[in-house]
Image (cartoon, rainbow, N blue to C red):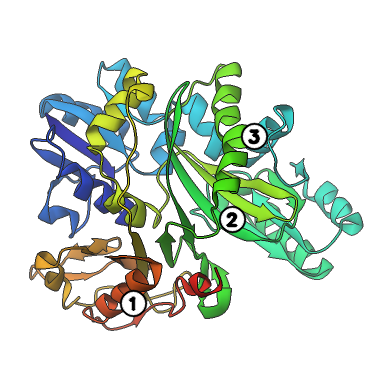
Amino acid sequence: MNILIVGSGGREHAIAASVVKSSHADKIYCAPGNAGIAKIAECVPIGAMEFEKLAAFAKEKNVGFTIVGMDDPLVGGIVDVFEKEGLTIFGPRKNAAILEGSKAFSKDLMKKYNIPTAAYETFDDSHKALEYIDTAKLPIVLKADGLALGKGVLICNTLEEAKAGVKEIMEDKKFGSAGNHMVIEEFMTGREVSVLSFVDGKTIQIMSSAQDHKRAKDGDLGLNTGGMGTFSPSPFYTKEVDAFCKEHIYQKTVDAMAAEGREFKGIIFFGLMLTEDGPKVLEYNARFGDPEAQVVLPRMKNDVIEVMQACVDGRLDQLKLEFEENAAVCVVLASDGYPLSYEKGFEIFGEETFDDKDGYYCFHAGTKKNEDGKIVTNGGRVLGITAKGADLKEARANAYAAADWISFENKYMRHDIGKAIDEA
């Protein structure tokens, strides 16, 4: 059948690379896509938030299955629009995507259903938030309630930083309407782990664990980004952690959403903090993580369309997820200056090197073809260089070796992705 993927980043390229291997995929479309995705799918110039146009395109091209990679269209209700038109689509409806769309909602859900998370308070008035901060224990975490491209979280070590953060989020609206409401929560310490899962409304199946690196600079310094690299599996996600999360977090979240009349079908991303008191939920996302998808999907043995179709049909319990007994590391090549200001339009050299390299992937994020047909940089995060290995150390060495195959002016990357592996 014909497949449509909605999105334009490295996550969508990783999804497309998995869909190409499916025995159920005929023609693959991506809207709007990017220069890398264009090598394996037909990219169409329709924006991810143009729901009516996307639905009309799906009907015109006899698309049998649509996959939504991005958070904005899910939170905006693209699934509801497609279902109303009788189209099959993978992802949560609007009333379920709120799990990611509102941090206040997700925190309240966890409190109500006794799912482990950090203590918190929510605010829609900046003055009341400032009053609360005066009495709060430092450091403290400020979170814009809505979607903020993974950047709406501020960790404040001093009272001055916290007060400036409230002004930044709620008054200056640095993250737009995402800052109309704000969550203030206790600062947790420990290892962060990302766990992706497939959900069919009642059954949840966990994918291989991963670990992201959000900060822009080596040593976890610099500003928060959408992700500078990741590895899978995480050596810190032990059998004991897995058992605890299965009992106290994963199924309880799915059941809680169902109990609230918000049946969730699609991907739930669990951002976990492994604290001294046990694993706790940092955040939920309602879609594949990026760049987590770039290290998890290449290791999945299953036909991705079969798994997603089972989620839509409510028969996920009939399948068993299987992953390769190896590891993968992704190093993000960014434009120097990201996530603040950076230049675009530089020609990218060397990405064709990956075409005949088994176990190596060059996932495009911020790229496009210019007027001369050259692939050029077109964003802050440009490419995700992923490599497999027998173990994490080999995968890390392979990924950094592969990162050197690529060159473009203004190229920037962290050099310590997966360094925590040495401490495991």
| Residue 333 visible at all | no
Instruction: Measure the C-alpha gap from mark 2 to mark 3.
Output: 27 Å
Residue beneath label 3, please? 248
Q: Nearer the viewer, residue 396 or 293?
A: 396
Dot 2 lies on which element? loop
The quadrant the N terminus occupies is: top left
In the rendered image, which residue does mark 2 sit on? 152
Up/down of 351 relative to 311, above or below: below
**Dot 3 or dot 1, earlier in sequence:** 3
Q: Which residue is mark 1?
A: 397
Q: Residue at x 36, y 30 (%)?
A: 78
Residue 119: % across, % down: 78, 45
Which residue shows up at 16% across the image and 39% down it? 22
Verify CB contact (< 8 Å) between mark 1 and mark 2: no
Quarter of the image where one finds residue 397: bottom left
Q: Nearer the viewer, mark 2 or mark 3?
A: 3
Kind of residue indicated by mark 2: Gly
**Front position in the image: 328 or 338:** 328
Q: Position of residue 257 (x, y in %)?
A: 57, 24
Looking at this view, is 301 or 61 the one in front? 301
